[in-house]
Image (cartoon, coloured by chain):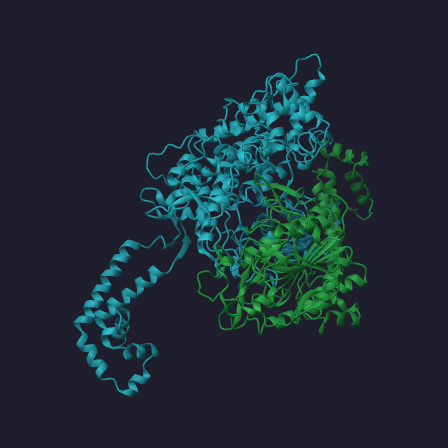
Amino acid sequence: MTSMHPLQHQTRRHFFSRCSVGLGSIALSSLMAAPAPKMRNPLEPKKTHFPAKAKNVIFLFMAGGPSQLDLFEHKPQLTKLNGKPIPESYTAGKRFAFMDSSHRSDLLASRRSFKQYGQSGAWVSDLLPHTTSIVDDISIVTTCKTDLFNHAPAKLYMNTGSGLFGRPSMGSWVTYGLGSECEDLPGFVVLQSGPRGPRGGSVLWGSGVLPTTYQGVPLRNQGDPIVNLSTPSQITPTQQRQVVDSVRELNLKHLVETGDDEIATRINAYEMAYRMQTSAPELMDTSDESQATLDLYGIKDPKETSFARNCLLARRLVERGVRFVQLYDTNWDHHGGPTENLEKHLPPKCLDIDQASAALVKDLKQRGLLDDTIVIWGGEFGRTPMGEVRESTGRNHHIDAFTMWFAGGGFKRGTVYGQTDEFGFGPVENPVHVHDIHATLLHQLGLDHERLSVRSQGLDFRLTGVDPAHVVKGILA
Amino acid sequence: MKRLLIFLSSLAGATLHAAQPQPQISFNRDVRPILSENCFACHGFDPKHRQADLRLDTFAGATEDHDGIRGIVPGDLTQSAAWQRIISTDPDEVMPPPKSHKPPLSPAQRTILKTWIEQGAKYERHWSFEPPKPSPGSSIDSFIQDRLAQEKLSPSPAASPATLIRRVSLDLTGLPPTPEEVAAFLADPSDQAYSKLVDRLLQSPHYGERWGRWWLDQARYADSNGYSIDAPRQIWKFRDWVIDALNADMPFDQFTIEQLAGDLLPNASESQKIATGFHRNTQINQEGGIDKEQFRIDSVFDRVATTGTVWLGLSIGCAQCHDHKFDPIEQKEYYQLFAFFNNQDEPTLKIFDQNLDVRELTREFKQLETQIKTFIQDHTSELDAWEAGLTPAIKKSLSSFLTKILALPKNKRSFAQNQSLFAASVGGVGTFRELNDRYKEIDTLLNQGVTTLVMKELPKPRKTTVFIKGDFTRPADEVTPGTPGVLHPFKSTPLQPNRLDLAKWIVSPENPLTARVIVNRIWQQYFGRGLVETENDFGMQGTTPSHPELLDWLATELLAKKWSLKDIHRLIVTSNTYRQSSSNRPDLREKDPGNYLLARQSRLRLDAEVVRDVALSASGLLAPQIGGPPVYPPIPDGVMGQGQVKRTWTVSKGADRYRRGLYTFIYRASPPPTLTVFDALEGFTTCTRRIRSNTPLQALTLMNDSGFFEFATALEKIIQSESLDAAFRRCTSRPPHPDELAILQKLDPLTAARTLLNLDETVTRE
């Protein structure tokens, strides 16, 4: 067993003699105790299809469907006709969630007060006082459209461009297309706040038909920020380093014997895992942030999980080169039930996110990161102009027109795009379909949505699906 | 492009000999891939997307006269408009057009098309729609070696006996060999001993577990309902059915029929009904406010797509919304297949202990019920007297259950209530007691046991229509069950053919696809890639086989061996091709970096479940029992809170903590991370080939996960009680080299154990 097989001998000689080949030089230098250089890292930064306007994305996802009619869409006609049935021309042939139940479908006025703000004169309600201070930094799109009206499928649709499970999510596509510029954290990170996980769960950041390398990694606020990040408690740091070192040494020997590049990838993976063990806790430890910064975001207790803390973490992540950060804040489903109505429960939800969302844009801007970073705010759909009366007042799911906003990364500063009808039911000009949002996002990142594809099960999968999608030029600077 | 490489290289080789005549171009091998990749999207089968009324997928279409212009004129390049457009340098003229983002055809591709047109532009039917061609007297090795010889390559020497026994044990059972098994094989590594080893492994009950998981991937098996609510479900009896059927080497045709239509077989047995769980592995949406019909139809879509992918290797799902762009499947034909799956009721089957005579017990139960009723009627007066004699004090002492019954008027009491009352009062002894006790005993027996999800045909079929763009709210023409016209004819006598007829059509010997698809998918497990690389697409967009004659030979062998999968496994693992060393070679790195020609084996990272199984085996903790309800080994904190509904995870005690990976409970919305990190599936859709990723999260799992740490502490004890050498052998099935041992000897035993479980070699099949 100890005598070398002739083939093995030949292989070994081959690797040492051809140092111009990446693998050979790596094996050689590593055997000489140099640190293993980067090799075949699937997250290595890649070339864009054309010059990019932005490098990173932060998506603030309001899970449940925020009511655009109580936040951004000022509709005097809706107020005037409060309590009247919606003209049938609007609803004929439409399908709604909870169709089988007989909730009232009369028009419901917003009880919020609206004012216009900034150069763009954007309407914003009194529920979002801090957002008013960034209206001149953002593009507000009031005519977003989706195809699916139940939570889980619609969330999948917003994230993957399809209501079916098993498709790659936006963050996976982006890290697949661009790689990551961060060597000690995952390229796609997910943060969560609110009373429970988002409907749909981990498939929302799944990699579908793409390799799992590209799936979102949830950073958790309790316990290990990443599953299995901590060294077992019985193990000393020295022992952990010994494992990494001895695994590398033995793997290198085997790499030389077999000539299998996968071993090189694995050696790299162990190095990155080891670095993550330090860098992820460092990321989560916000004690180096100033009180002024904490105040800007409205973080009361930096140790407590909150949307505000997650916004701060999002900034820290893009600072470190993480490509795609997604924040989920749950409980935006205000149907009018005892714990989900517009009067009592929408205001505290807005309080949770308003200041921090605005602070994130301001903070990125003051640090010079906003030009490279796209910030998106929105949910999987919006809510109906018709009221839904359960125990108290609410609104049903609505897919024909809802509001999202976009900031940074080459998006226009201070604009309102799209026009909805007098009740805010549907678009009258410039509808923006979810696939258009995807196409636009990829465009800003230097990726052509028609070329970013992967072949599986006989189909070329794309984030934007098969029907034509358009880059929304009207919101680009 | 990759798929073309080999064929191009052989053509290029041929053209070096300029004196020889042009090589004969094969349409299927050489031309179709180019046309399919570059032309068919706009000039193919689908009339809705066809441009300029030109189709290039048929001879008639390509040569049709359009006002004097013809796409292709056989033998005449200057008159062939398609060729002129391909070689054009004008961006407005050139094909494929720049806006398609397809690069202009390469010089090699042009040479092929040019030669093909010059040779008369002969078309062939797509290879996979033609029946497999037999090659009597051949063997796997002859096909592989002939091809290697053409490329002037030699096969690799056989792997070492230690590597070989670990390889074949992992491949056939998903478990590494024991140190004793390795020692025995090393003492006699002869062909006969190897052949005996293979027989032993094929007889091992763990074979069914290993290959069962292969099939469960395709069946999209999981233990919960999926979507957002993701409640747990019971369908593990189906999983056990698969393991048992494979262990018994149930012929694949029967295996197919029972899963697709076991309920429709005459006098269907319980086991045959359980088998129909295959198509109950679809998700169920329990979210509020949904349209139930929408999700029922989604599950039927899934059944059609899964059947097409698993058995036919065709992306039939593409025709859900429109005629297939690349394969000759019309939208109408899609809905004809849909019709087979549209008539199901979706019941739950109760499964009793095999030792129970359920029929007899049910009969006795009914009889007892009558007897008890009669007895109570005959003794009403006694009960009345008892009731009349109840003082308030006695009443107070009675259970609230009885008090509630007593509060009811006598004529409103149910049988069960009367029965309880009677038992608690005057019936406490004698005949009534005997009858009642037996009644309760049978009741308990009949109510215990597990359930599983099965298929059942509705007495009256649902109406099936085409859905415009696949939208169930837009029904169009009504259709009846049928199969795609491009394949072998559907011979069914009944007016309303059902799933059984479909299943029989699929396993008909005339079917050119199924046997090829299955042997290819088996081959893929052994070499990391199928002979057809696109294992789920044998259509026009799929890759052509790297060794077409070998694929056909294996497919005909499968039929000749009466669909015995074990015979195919034996054929493959006893071949020299399989037994080669997997080490890379300088000449192969140059000539065949992707190892398409198989001049060596491939190193394959173990499947997620097997990563666990190997660590359990190495550390001596494995609990090897087969089958039964899913188990709950430890998982990291907080994992179960990721889904919409937080699910509990009570860690299994005793042996169930150390069961093989395939028995771990899988919640689709929050699957166990130690498995998914190694690319295990959530069971959302059928999967015919797993991705093999290689990530830092895998490193974190092997180093830090509490489960793997526990395995390491067990391996540490083996180092202490036996030796480092023994622990190394348990992980890799080979002795360590002195320099490897030297590295490990510097470590404390626990660090050495953790190192061993983290080695690339430990989680790899060499």
Q: Quadrant of residue B408?
A: bottom left
Q: Position of residue A427 (x, y in %)?
A: 60, 56
The residue lying toward the viewer, choosing from A93 and B676, is: A93
Above or below for A247 versus B38: below
Q: Which quarter shows the N terminus of chain B?
A: top right
Residue B206 visible, this orientation: no
Above or below for B608 versus B432: above
Q: Which chain is green?
A: A
Above or below for A426 versus B536: below
Residue B493 visible, this orientation: yes
Q: Position of residue B132 (x, y in %)?
A: 50, 26
The residue lying toward the viewer, choosing from A377 and B509, is: A377
The residue sitting at 72% across, 18% down in the picture is: B16
Q: Position of residue A16 (x, y in %)?
A: 80, 36
Q: Which chain is cyan?
A: B
Q: Position of residue B159 (x, y in %)?
A: 64, 34
Above or below for A281 versus B469: below
Classify residue A180 as left or right of residue B377: right
The residue lying toward the viewer, choosing from B104 and B560, is: B104
Number of callouts: 0
